[in-house]
Image (cartoon, rainbow, N blue to C red):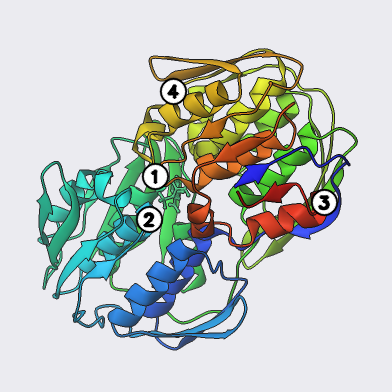
Amino acid sequence: MRAAAPGRPLSGSLRVPGDKSISHRALMFGALAVGTTAIEGLLEGEDVLRTAAAMRALGAEVEQLAPGRWRVAGRGIGGLLEPADVLDMGNSGTAARLLCGLLAGHPIFSVMTGDASLRRRPMRRVIDPLSATGARFAAREGGRLPLAIEGAADPLPLDYRLPVASAQVKSAVLLAGLCAPGTTRVVEPEPTRDHTENMLRHFGATVRVEDTPEGRVIELEGQPELVAAPIMVPGDPSSAAFPVAAALLVPGSALTVEGIGLNPLRTGLLATLREMGADLTVRNERVEGGEPTGDLLVRHGPLRAVEVPPGRVPSMIDEYPILAVLAAFAQGTTRMRGLAELRVKESDRLAATAALLAAAGARAEILGDDLLVHGNGAPPPGGGLVATHMDHRIAMSALVLGLASAAPMRIDDGAFIDTSFPGFAALMNRVAGAEALTAG
Ligand SMILES: O=C(O)C1=C[C@@H](OP(=O)(O)O)[C@@H](O)[C@H](O)C1
Ligand SMILES: C=C(OP(=O)(O)O)C(=O)O
């Protein structure tokens, strides 16, 4: 795929597809609830469709009624059935890790695999805590997929302090805790996205959250009856980051992204962009389906370099590749600190982002776990071919860069964009002009 300067500003308004994190959870909690859960705005990206297929394989009725509108007839906690075949979670770390938690508490045997990217990603981070429930795991060397799970008949509740700030690990522990008697307790060193906690409450579970000197403590009362409840999925702020970045970079642009999730544990990028001098206005702030939502108006303008503290990582974990692209156009050196977790995403995102910038003729370097991007306030030359390494966010970041670099950019493979942002090219071309993103 190829991205070239559109020759006109981005204008008008758009909606991005539903939030990926919330969509996975809606399907999983729907499958565990008693009754029928109606979902509006579900992300129909490849990652979420893998979760839908897995829930079906575990006995839930999962049905698409219309685009974005789904219904899930649940089996109740403890009611999942043994799947007849291997569960293939494709490219999705969230699907694989949350499912480990869910399967740990059911007395069934299952085998899970994924694509070449997912089979490289670490699963010990969930296997280790979940093994203490009584579930048994057998994985490939290094704790990689494929993985066999023998769930516990009488799972024990966990009391676990997360060694890394990870919403996936937290959620896996809480999902296992649904099947265990008593209180499951998770302590996070830094708060991470809390969609699991919000949705548990929405389905009637008792969840207590307290900030203490040891970190954020989350307690879940086990074996609740989850009652089906309707879910409205807001637009994904991590997907919105791409059109937002394009509007910041293409001169003259003024673009509104409507109906995006503004959960404060997801808005680290907006805070960073404001520090860089970006012109952002939030309108129509409201709460939809228990999640803060709003419209975001973004206007083109110059950006200045900033230092992004490590404490901001959890609230913008997936936004670093696109932030690095923005930093390449900013004036000065942007330093993004504490990015070790980027090494274990769909690709080694630290290396892939630095290589993306190098392919565009921008200057970037990795120092320990930090990424430094040197900008001079002007567009980088562009003209390069970017290796995307099965990583949707690297692919979209490279294409956005190409919309504003002096020469067009190409990526080796656009197929993985569908994992999180189906219709990306068509949507961008609608606001940027038909020739902005093209095949080839
Ligand atoms: O819980 C989730 O839905 C997610 C958590 C994050 O991963 P980690 O938990 O590994 O940080 C994020 O990168 C991923 O895209 C979605
Ligand atoms: C890291 C991501 O997703 P996952 O871990 O679910 O593959 C992402 O979407 O950027």
- Residue 165 in the image: above or below residue 243: above
- On the image, numbered disc 3 is attached to which residue? 433
Count of numbered circles on the image:
4
Identified by mark 2, the residue type is Asn
Rendering coords of residue 304 (x, y %) = 74, 17
Location of residue 254 by image quarter: top right
Q: For the residue marked with disc 4, what is the amino acid?
A: Gly
Q: Is mark 2 within 8 Å of ligand 2?
A: yes
Question: Between marks 1 and 3, how big is the CA–CA gap?
Answer: 30 Å
The x and y percentages for residue 395 are 54, 43
Residue at numbered disc 2: 91
**Residue drawn 78% across the image and 34% down it:** 248
Let me know if residue 315 appears in the view.
no
Image position of 221 (left or right of 199) = left
- Give the residue type at disc 1: Glu
Between the C-alphas of marks 4 and 2, the distance is: 24 Å
2 and 1 marks in contact (CB < 8 Å): yes
Label 3 environment density (alpha carbons within 10 Å; few <14, some 14–19, many ≥20): some
> How far is disc 2 from disc 1 in space, using C-alphas?
7 Å
Of helix, strand and loop, which one carries label 4?
loop
Image position of 425 with respect to 325: above or below: below
User: Between tags 1 and 3, which lies in front?
Assistant: 3
Determine if the C-beta at disc 1 is less than 8 A from ligand 2.
Answer: yes
Residue type at mark 3: give it: Gly
The residue indicated by pointer 4 is 338
Give the mark, 4 or 2, whose residue is nearer the N terminus.
2
**Which mark is in front, 4 or 2?**
2
Tell me the residue that label 1 is attached to. 346
Lower sequence index among marks 3 and 4:
4
Sequence-wise, the earlier of marks 4 and 1 is: 4
